[in-house]
Amino acid sequence: DVSLPGVPARPVPALPPGAVDRSDFNLKCVACGLCIANCRGGCLSVSTSLKRFGQPEMDFRHGYCLTGCAQQCAKVCPAGAIRPLDGVERKNVHVGHAIWKRELCIRETEGVQCTACSRKCPVGAIHVVEGFPVVDKGKCIGCGACEHVCPARPMPAIFVKGFERQR
């Protein structure tokens, strides 16, 4: 059995694509859970933060935001908190960016030549340079594929920091 990693302390939690602006999302979201139940990538979970209790946020322990997703989360949102991307492909919506922590990476802690994060990145935003992953923050869309596959325990060595406003 492989253990699930812990949840990193994110400076800003990532929201589903189409949530656009955090303050607007927080006002509109009714915490119904329909987006969580219908997420094809399995990456939405219920927030336990007192400010956002019950609202969805990205959690990459069980999945990640798929670039080919039909955005079921927006289709089922009754409050308009998650808007349809309307002609914009998921790979062009930046919900956050990955941050790599050298001190947690098994390349550093175990001396293992792991390339899981760079191989899994669907947009080619992570490259191994001089033996260590480097994140191109301009290219990274915050999908969480890298965090999902990171084998470091008890915490992943790479995690997604969300944006206050998606781009």
Image (tube, helix red, strand yellow):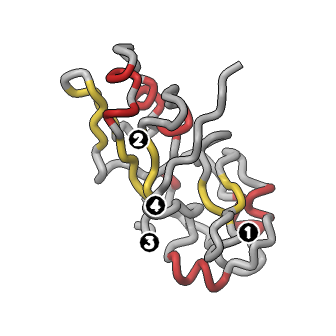
- Cα separation between marks 2 and 1: 30 Å
In contact (CB < 8 Å): disc 1 and disc 3:
no
**Residue 68 in which image quadrant:** top right
99 or 143, nearer to the observer: 99
**Residue 47 in which image quadrant:** bottom right
Q: Indicate which disc, 1 or 3, sits on the residue closer to the N terminus.
A: 1
Q: Position of residue 117 (x, y in %)?
A: 43, 31
Judge from the rendering whether residue 53 lies leftward or rightward of residue 148; answer left or right.
right
49 or 29, nearer to the observer: 49
Total numbered labels placed on residues in the image: 4
Q: Circle 1 sits on which residue?
A: 54
Name which residue type carries label 4.
Gly
Residue at 70% across, 55% down: 45
Q: Circle 4 sits on which residue?
A: 162
Q: Where is 37 relative to 87, above or below?
A: above
- Cα separation between marks 4 and 3: 7 Å
Crowding at label 3, few (<14), some or many (≥20) Cα neighbours within 10 Å?
A: some
Q: Where is 53 relative to 69, above or below?
A: below
Say which element carries label 3.
loop
> Which quadrant: the N terminus?
top right
Residue at 38% across, 14% down: 112
Residue at 44% across, 68% down: 166
Q: Circle 2 sits on which residue?
A: 123
Q: Position of residue 95 (x, y in %)?
A: 47, 60
- Cα separation between marks 4 and 2: 17 Å
Q: Which-is-in-front pick, marks 2 and 1?
A: 1
Crowding at label 1, few (<14), some or many (≥20) Cα neighbours within 10 Å?
A: some
